[in-house]
Amino acid sequence: MPSKIDPNTFDSLRQMTDAAFVSQLVDTFLEDAPRQIKEMRAALKEGDAETFRRLAHSIKSNAATFGALELSDQARELEMLGKENKLDQVAGSLDAFEATFKSVARELRDLTE
């Protein structure tokens, strides 16, 4: 199975900071993102496009920091749907997004242990 984390991006992050700081960032992301995804589902259900967009934007930026490029791209697409108030077009995209996040989470845990 191909990596969900771009090794060059992740290594650059480690080189710019240190392993302990990267672990702390990863831990925070892995705590926050599931809550944010849950909030995205609630915003979708409520038709709250702005909250949906904001949450997708946050995950997009954090995922890019770690080199989780597929997750970041998916978040960008969701963010745009929120920005354009096209939540009716989200459909299964949020499920695919969450599945990608779970793969990314496993890989990030492995990289920081």
Image (cartoon, rainbow, N blue to C red):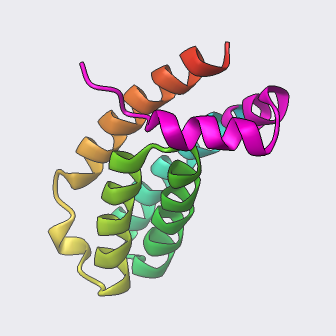
Dominant SS type (magenta):
helix
Q: Which quadrant of the view contains residue 27?
A: top right
Measured from the top left, where is residue 66 in percent x and y?
56, 43
**Residue at the image point whose x is 51% and y is 53% from the top:** 64
Image: 55 above or below 37:
below
* Left or right: where 83 falls relative to 108: left
Query: Is residue 29 something that shows in the picture?
Result: no
Q: Is residue 111 magenta?
A: no
Q: Quadrant of the N terminus?
A: top left
Image: 12 above or below 76:
above
**Residue at the image point whose x is 30% and y is 85% from the top:** 85
Q: How many marks?
A: 0
Measured from the top left, where is residue 47 in percent x and y?
35, 75
Query: Is residue 40 something that shows in the picture?
Result: yes
**Residue at the image point whose x is 50% and y is 68% from the top:** 57
Q: Is residue 19 magenta?
A: yes
Q: Quadrant of the C terminus?
A: top right
**Residue at the image point whose x is 81% and y is 41% from the top:** 17
Image: 56 above or below 66:
below
Give the magenta part as a residue range.
1-26
Q: Nearer the viewer, residue 59 or 18?
A: 18
Measured from the top left, where is residue 30 in percent x and y?
61, 34
Q: Which quadrant of the view contains residue 31?
A: top right
Measured from the top left, where is residue 19 in percent x and y?
78, 27
Furthest-bottom residue in view? 84
